[in-house]
């Protein structure tokens, strides 16, 4: 298998999981994604083989090009990111909250983006997948997923997602998942209609933050989520992407007490150590939706035209 092929278009569930049978979890090893991950591990995550590293770089470059072509169909302010933990279970309340936020933002014209893996990332794309349907259908889909496989460590995690997709066929809405083979032990969610999967995780993380001009929703997570919070704060401080975007935190106890990054950012912003931060925090998913919808980015060129 040529696992380093140049991509002319982004992956989707069909191309990434070609060869996978939802009724047989062991068939993942025969899928395109499974073989690519096995090859990635065989050659080494940080291979010293020039041919391998060059091929991976060319693959990732082609994915970036394909992603940029896809995003040309969206105003930058329409693109909204979600950051959160991969360990979030399907039965957890925040999973439903993230899916609800994503569903309703998608219905309002937003393109939802995440790291494309399990947990809060899967909830993001499940919500977008269920856009246009009643909320009760979303609840039923979540119950089904949680009953069959509550976490990505369960054998039927991937198969159960495909079965829900069959039960609720794809509508007219898109979402963009940006996973990586660095964390290949965490399968990419097939609910993302477009999948930009990278070998280089640093490029992947920068892409998620950079394209999410319409704002980022931060949900409880571990070290990776905290890292992304400060990456986004730095981007907004320096207006790296031409505009500072909202940082909407969901979970007061988590972000103020368990992992108290929010009071720190708020204090740094008040003292002028961080500039341009648009911070909000709540436990109410509807408030998160309101914060994102109220944001209308103005780029420097917009001011020149006035």
Image: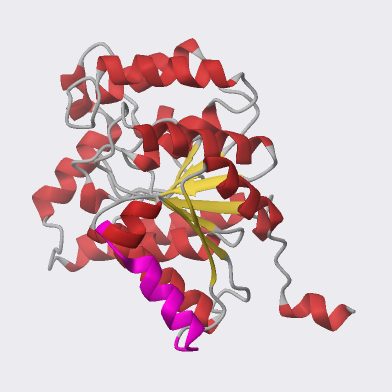
**Location of residue 42 in the rendering, given as x and y in whole percent from the top left corner:** 9, 49
Which residue is pictured at 22% across the width and 49% down the height? 183
**Location of residue 48 in the rendering, given as x and y in whole percent from the top left corner:** 12, 68
Of 129 and 35, nearer the camera is 129
Assess whether residue 290 is covered by the magenta stretch.
no
Q: Quadrant of residue 214?
A: bottom right
Of 239 and 187, nearer the camera is 239
Q: How is the image coloured?
A: secondary structure
Q: Quadrant of the N terminus?
A: top left
- Left or right: 20 in relation to 106: left
Of 86 and 143, nearer the camera is 143
Q: Which residues are magenta?
A: 258-273
Assess whether residue 264 is covered by the magenta stretch.
yes
Q: Is 293 situated above or below 122?
A: below
Which residue is pictured at 26% across the width and 11% down the height? 23
Query: Is residue 202 visible from the viewing direction of this image?
Result: no
- Residue placed furthest toward the right: 306
| Count of all numbered marks drawn on residues in the image | 0
Of 143 and 148, nearer the camera is 143
**Location of residue 273 in the rendering, given as x and y in whole percent from the top left corner:** 45, 88
- Left or right: 109 in relation to 131: right
Which residue is pictured at 35% across the width and 48% down the height? 179
Query: Is residue 187 visible from the viewing direction of this image?
Result: yes
- Left or right: 159 in relation to 25: right
Q: Quadrant of the C terminus?
A: bottom right
**Location of residue 215 in the rendering, given as x and y in whole percent from the top left corner:** 56, 59
- Residue placed furthest toward the bottom: 272
Secondary structure, magenta segment, majority class? helix
């Amino acid at each position: 298998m040529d696992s380093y092929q140049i991509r002319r278009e982004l992956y989707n569930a069909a191309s990434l999981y070609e060869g996978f049978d939802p009724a047989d979890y062991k068939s993942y090893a025969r899928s395109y994604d499974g073989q690519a991950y096995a090859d990635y591990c065989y050659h080494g995550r940080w291979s010293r083989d020039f041919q391998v590293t060059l091929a991976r770089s060319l693959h990732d470059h082609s994915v970036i090009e394909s992603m940029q072509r896809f995003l040309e169909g969206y105003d930058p302010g329409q693109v909204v990111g979600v950051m959160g933990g991969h360990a979030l279970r399907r039965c957890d309340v925040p999973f439903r909250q993230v899916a609800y936020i994503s569903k309703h933002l998608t219905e309002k014209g937003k393109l939802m983006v995440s790291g494309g893996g399990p947990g809060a990332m899967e909830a993001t794309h499940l919500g977008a997948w269920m856009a246009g349907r009643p909320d009760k259908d979303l609840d039923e889909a979540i119950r089904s997923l949680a009953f069959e496989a509550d976490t990505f460590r369960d054998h039927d995690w991937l198969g159960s997602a495909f079965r829900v997709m069959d039960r609720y066929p794809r509508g007219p809405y898109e979402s963009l998942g940006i996973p990586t083979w660095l964390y290949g032990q965490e399968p990419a969610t097939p609910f993302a209609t477009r999948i930009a999967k990278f070998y280089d995780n640093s490029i992947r993380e920068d892409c998620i933050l950079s394209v999410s001009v319409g704002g980022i929703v931060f949900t409880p997570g571990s070290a990776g989520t905290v890292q992304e919070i400060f990456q986004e704060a730095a981007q907004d401080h320096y207006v790296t992407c031409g505009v500072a975007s909202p940082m909407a935190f969901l979970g007061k106890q988590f972000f103020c007490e368990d992992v108290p990054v929010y009071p720190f950012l708020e204090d740094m912003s008040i003292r002028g150590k961080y500039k341009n931060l648009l911070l909000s925090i709540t436990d109410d998913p509807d408030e998160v939706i309101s914060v994102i919808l109220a944001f209308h980015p103005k780029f420097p060129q917009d001011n020149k035209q006035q």
